[in-house]
Image (spheres, helix red, strand yellow):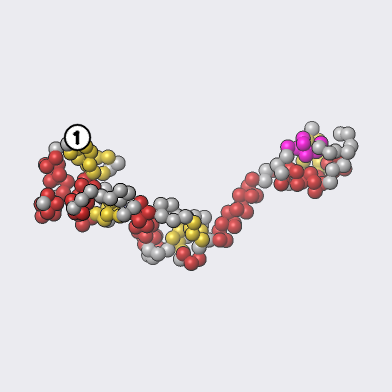
Amino acid sequence: MHYRRWRIHGDTETTLKAANGDGYLQGGYPGHQVDGVRVFDHVKVAELALGKPLPPGAVVHHVNEIKTDCRPENLVICPNKAYHNLIHARMRALDACGDANKRACRYCKEYDSLENMRVYGNGASTAYWHTQCNRDAAKATYYANRGPLKVGVLEFGGERGTYALWSQKTGIKSSTISMRINKYGWSLDRALTEGAKNER
Ligand SMILES: [Zn+2]
Ligand SMILES: [Zn+2]
């Protein structure tokens, strides 16, 4: 009955305020104190439209994304967060590329059809990416993490030398030194002394 009245008057917020007294904004969403309990207007309006309390996990979406617009026609009751996220993902895609079915690759940020991408996760947090973009990113991370000491010249104990030179000095194969440092992450000290045949 109240819901019908709001509908007719078309000004939910004003009517709610008049009816219930204490209005407030939380996170940009208007709400009201009803019998000492804070209730968001969009929840109240949705529940009146539904004729019962929102089911657990339900989320109310604002169609025009204006948080204060709680007219019934601006609200959609989503059964869960995943469904709500889907609505927003589709809106973003439509906005960005004109096709609600496309999604953005997490690496190159380009929108593309799902058949061209890997999809990871579902519902609340889904990630999409091109296989090639993922490969490129992995490669870039690998090279970024190889520090400057790991290529070419090693400086240890005040001496600088190539892997080959350190191999001569220590009697450890240069490929072994390289593996110890680059693959196993050993310290230079350990890499150049463990199993060394020659005294330095
Ligand atoms: Zn929403
Ligand atoms: Zn990509």
In the image, 122 versus 113, the foreground residue is 122
Horizontal placement of 58 versus 189: left or right? left
Residue 20 showing in the rendered view: yes
Which residue extends farthest top? 157
Q: Position of residue 154 (x, y in %)?
A: 77, 41
Q: Residue at x 35, y 51 (%)?
A: 81
Q: Position of residue 79 (x, y in %)?
A: 31, 54
Horizontal placement of 46 versus 195: left or right? left
Q: Position of residue 23 (x, y in %)?
A: 19, 39
Quadrant position of residue 168: top right
Dot 1 surroundings within 10 Å: few (below 14), some, or many (20 or more)? few
Q: Is residue 191 magenta?
A: yes
Q: Is 105 above or below relative to 38?
A: below
Tag 1 secondary structure: loop
Q: Position of residue 75 (x, y in %)?
A: 24, 54
Q: Is residue 167 magenta?
A: no
Q: Residue at x 56, y 57 (%)?
A: 134
In the image, 79 versus 74, the foreground residue is 79
Q: Is 143 above or below relative to 98?
A: above
Q: Is 51 above or below relative to 32?
A: below
Q: Residue at x 39, y 60 (%)?
A: 93
Magenta-tinted stretch:
187-193
Q: Name the main secondary structure of what is drawn in magenta.
A: helix
User: Where does label 1 land, which residue?
Assistant: 36
